[in-house]
Image (spheres, rainbow, N blue to C red):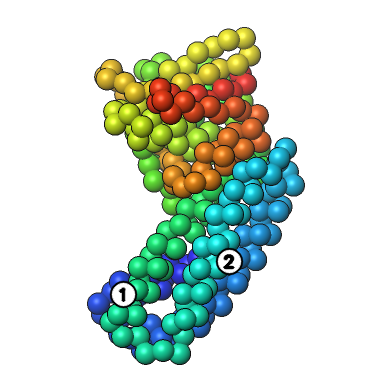
Amino acid sequence: MGSVRNLSQLLQSVRVGPRAIESVLPDVHASCEVINASTRSLIETIAARLPDRGATDELLAFMVPRATELERELSSAIGKSINAKLRLGLERAVLRLSGELDAGRSLLDTLNEAVQGGLLRAGLGSLLEGSRQTRGDEGRVEVRVPSRLESEVLVNPRLFVVLLGFGAGLVQGASGAAAGMTVEAAGNSRTLTVMRTTAAGPTVSLPTLPLIAPTLACARAAARASRAELAWDEAAARFTLSLSA
């Protein structure tokens, strides 16, 4: 994916001439086979540790055709003189496919974290505070939170903040309003609800997930793999994440 991103940057740069682009196309083309093989291998490894293959099959059906399309686009350009028309078409294709494949890779990382990462008991306040130090390629979204968060939950910390940020992004996208979180306790479970809000209060910035076709299925599968349950009501713009205390 690094070589694909580099090619995308070269194609967009007015300082890079046709010969420089022509010289790197064969290597980037060769990387497409690696992307395809690595995607299939990693998805099979993850699928074996999930209760069903629904999410991984969706992700595979999203990524493989795009890697194949990228390989085809590059193959058709290799050996040709990169004139302005060909370069513009190649730039559009590589930019689109690179972004889509990167989004799929992010979901692969999320599922891999869910099946490989451990669980620990931690306070909600410390988990959300720790999200400020979270680094990665994800986008970020703000969510308003209660001023006092004393509940403890059993979670994979990195996955928790990503899933909660994903919920906040869904709420904002569906409602066009700010997202706010509430916490309800019932026995040994805690339910975090994210909905539209107009209330004032402290906010935290959370990493989130790219919104592509398999995202919701992958988020649900990742939650279940870490002993949580995720629900999304698009009509009500209401997201819930149920956790063990």
Q: Residue at x 46, y 74 (%)?
A: 73
Q: Residue at x 71, y 53 (%)?
A: 44
Secondary structure beneath dot 1 equals: helix
Q: What is the x, y in percent for residue 231?
A: 53, 27
Q: What is the x, y in percent for residue 62?
A: 54, 54
**Quadrant containing the C terminus in the rendered view:** top right
Residue 24 in view in this figure:
no
Answer left or right for 237 relative to 123.
left
Q: Which mark is residue 35?
A: 2
Secondary structure beneath dot 2 equals: helix
Query: Looking at the rendering, which quadrant does residue 9 occupy?
Result: bottom left
Mark 2 vs mark 1: in front: 1
First in sequence: mark 2 vs mark 1: 2
Give the total of numbered labels.
2
Q: Which mark is residue 88?
A: 1
Q: Residue at x 39, y 36 (%)?
A: 169
Answer left or right for 207 relative to 155.
left
Badge 1: how crowded within 10 Å, few (<14), some, or many (20+)? some
Mark-to-mark CA distance, 2 and 1: 24 Å
Q: What is the x, y in percent for residue 107?
A: 54, 48
Q: Residue at x 62, y 21 (%)?
A: 244
Marks 1 and 2: in contact by CB < 8 Å?
no
Residue 46 in view in this figure:
yes
Q: Amino acid at mark 1?
A: Leu
Q: Amino acid at mark 2?
A: Ile
Q: What is the x, y in percent for residue 224?
A: 64, 32
Q: Is residue 117 above or below residue 200?
A: below
Q: Is residue 51 above or below residue 241?
A: below
Badge 2: how crowded within 10 Å, few (<14), some, or many (20+)? some
